[in-house]
Amino acid sequence: MNQKMDLQVPALILEKILALIATHLNKQLRAIAKQFNCAVLGLAQLKREVDSRSEKRPTKADFRESGGFEQEAAVMLGLYREDYYDKQTTQKGIFEVSVLKNRFSSETTVNLLFDERFGQFKNLAKSQY
């Protein structure tokens, strides 16, 4: 007889275990980047609380529960698209790329145009676009 086991792990314990795994993974990725002198890109999903607040742009605080990314990352970027939240905006296809953390330089924001036809970003600062 094939019986299904019903494992019930309290959410808090599971969250702590996942945070420990993510922190360990972040440290390992950083060690690999140093060893091979290369960039390592890590992606993190933000907390859903961003949907419930009026200012939708990502902040460093949004990464705090993403398994140590905020502490370990040398550079953190946040992406924001006005037309995702406001269908009436004149900023169609414009992505704000905010440098939320940068150990090597300053924090800034750059606007890029996303060309859906080719799946590429274009620099809005260049007049040819």
Image (cartoon, grey):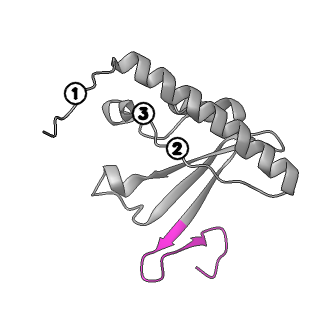
Residue 115: x and y in percent read 47, 76
**SS of the residue at dot 3?**
loop
Is residue 95 visible in the rendered image? The answer is yes
The quarter of the displayed image where residue 12 is located: top left
Residue, disc 3: 47
Closer to us: mark 2 or mark 1?
1
Alpha carbons under labels 2 and 1: distance apart: 29 Å
Alpha carbons under labels 3 and 2: distance apart: 9 Å
Residue 40: x and y in percent read 71, 54
First of labels 1, 3 by sequence position: 1
Classed neighbour count for the residue bearing mark 3: other residues with Cα under 10 Å, few (<14), some (14–19), many (≥20): some
- Looking at the rendered structure, the kind of residue marked 2 is Ala
Point 22% across, 27% down: residue = 6
Q: Nearer the viewer, residue 63 or 6?
A: 6
- Looking at the rendered structure, the kind of residue marked 1 is Asp
First of labels 2, 1 by sequence position: 1
**SS of the residue at dot 2?**
loop
**SS of the residue at dot 1?**
loop
Asked if the stretch drawn in magenta spans residue 122, the answer is: yes
Q: Residue furthest front?
A: 1
Point 54% across, 54% down: residue = 96
Q: Residue furthest left?
A: 1
Residue, disc 2: 44
Point 44% across, 24% down: residue = 15
Q: Which residues are magenta?
A: 113-129
The quarter of the displayed image where residue 90 is located: bottom left
Residue, disc 1: 6
Classed neighbour count for the residue bearing mark 1: other residues with Cα under 10 Å, few (<14), some (14–19), many (≥20): few
Alpha carbons under labels 1 and 3: distance apart: 28 Å
Above-or-below relation of 43 to 19: below
Is residue 65 visible in the rendered image? The answer is no
- Looking at the rendered structure, the kind of residue marked 3 is Lys
